[in-house]
Amino acid sequence: MSAAPQKAKAGAEKIEVIVSAVVPVNDLVTRFEFRRPDGAPFPPFSAGAHTVVEMNDAGRTRLNPYSLMSDPADSGTYAISVRRDDQGRGGSLFLHRNVKPGDRMTLSYPVNLFPIDLRGRKHVFLAGGIGITPFLAMIAQLEKLGARWELHYACRNEALASYADVLTARHPGKVRIYYDDRKQAIPLGDLLDGQPLGTHVYVCGPKGMIEWVHRTATEHGWPDDNVHSEEFLAPQPGQPFEVRLCKSDMTITVGENESLLEAMERCGVDAPFLCRGGACGQCETDVVEHDGEFIHRDHWLEDDQQASGTKIMPCVSRFVGPTLVLDR
Amino acid sequence: MSKFQFPKSIASRPVYGTLAPRPGKAHLMMADAEGAEALLDLAAQDAGLMGKAHILYIPRDTGQTYTDRLRALEPAQLYVGPSFDAALPRLRRVLSDAHMGLQVYLAGTEGLMGRAAAEVTAAGIPLGAVQTEHRGSVARRMQCVHCKGITEDVTTDPFTCSHCGLNLFVRDHYSRRLAAFQGVCIDAEDPGNVPEPVELYK
């Protein structure tokens, strides 16, 4: 058994917070700042960590992970920046439309699935769009350590380049911005080749960008251990399907617009989770029996595990077929 | 035949693989004695590799057996030196000038691979990205855990520490930092009661 204390409920421990500021950054992105009601310091976090924000959206509980972008040295504030996704499942829209300064909310303790490798001699950050958020915390942490870093930040255009002005003003020699509408692109191959031994590269952005960086780094002879990425997946809607949960002894139906994990929670099953975005591996569940096709969408299971039909990550993956029995 | 299959052991003991060409911007190869055979096999797999290769080679007791064959591979740079310590300043200089995309290939004795791997990882390449292939002698580089002295090329168990003279038992417990196995006094409780030394792996 692990020495870690046994938790009563799934997910990380929770923190009650008050929204201290809601700051529009541009047309799509808003920053939300939180403090604790009793003025107590927040638990410390390492740069790259995320928190799961709990939202009560007219009786429906939404749990969305967001990277903490605030300075890890500032224990009085947690801050996240949220990009409004008009086609998304509604979490970001809820935050943008309904959350006001003074509101009480619940966050999870920070969990870090995207830490800085502090053995690195140098750290190269590659951000795409709202993928800038974890790097804001990383830059703050590395500046205090006096460590070497540089940021290459690709944005759609100047108006949507969140924090680009602040970053370039503060760190003029270390930040390069690339604008899509000016046909600028990160010169990835050249960047990778010129780095001193012991450099680590970190990428956060759209799926295509993350795959591009991993593939190019491998082609240029970079060890996998020196390439870090984080992408939270939002669960995708799909055909409703039925699941038999044998430990809980119940059969539930996963609706079109909810994830398997959310359906289990709705039915009172205390299923484990941390990131809710297919990255952390916490919700990995054994498949007892199945007749149908899995739609695996996670970054956790290996390809052969996904193909084997013996595991599923309920936070993002779905199933199409008449029979699915899980060991939960 | 220069290959030896080490018996399965504790997790601390290093395991070695077979060198294979990997994509990279530059290729650093270091070998001693029969380790040259692993580099010759490697070159045979990818003719393009040697044009970007820097070979550091320590022939030890193989003399001229392999040096001409290595030269015939036409590596970008070939250094042939008398000992690992003689080659060390060059190795460190190569690593300090290197960029990401460097591939590292080590072959030969455990002592050479361990010492080179320690230098390479200290320079920032993760151990998992360093390729190794054992060839030749199974002699070990041992650290006396009592006096901390290193005895190179130990071939028997137990053996006598070349620094403090204690009778040492050869353990599989390995230090990556020191690139040495640990030797522990075998007759501490009953001085003089030392088993007859046997050749390693016999």
Image (spheres, grey):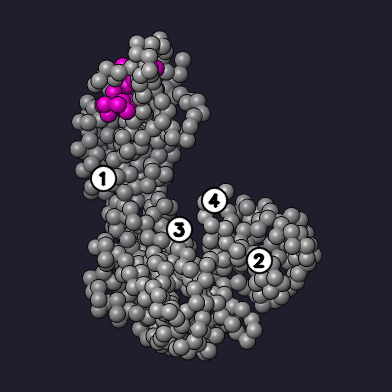
Image mark 1: chain: B
**Residue linked to disc 1:** B95
Q: Residues within 10 Å of mark 3 (few under 14, many from 20)?
A: few
Magenta residues span B139-160
Q: Residues within 10 Å of mark 1 (few under 14, many from 20)?
A: many
Q: Residues within 10 Å of mark 2 (few under 14, many from 20)?
A: some
Q: Position of residue B139 (x, y in %)?
A: 36, 22
Image mark 2: chain: A
A86 left or right, relative to B179:
right
Q: Does label 2 or label 3 sit earlier along the sequence? A: 3
Alpha-carbon span between mark 2 and mark 1: 52 Å
Nearest to the eye among marks 1 and 3: give it: 1
| Secondary structure state at the residue bearing disc 3 | helix
Q: Residue at x 65, y 68 (%)?
A: A261
**Residue linked to disc 2:** A270
Is residue B144 rendered magenta in the image?
Answer: yes
User: Residue A88's quadrant in the figure?
Assistant: bottom right
**Residue linked to disc 3:** A215
Q: Considering depth in this image, is A276 or B109 the residue closer to the camera?
A: A276
| Secondary structure state at the residue bearing disc 1 | helix
A286 left or right, relative to B115:
right
Quick check: do tags 1 and 4 share a chain?
Answer: no
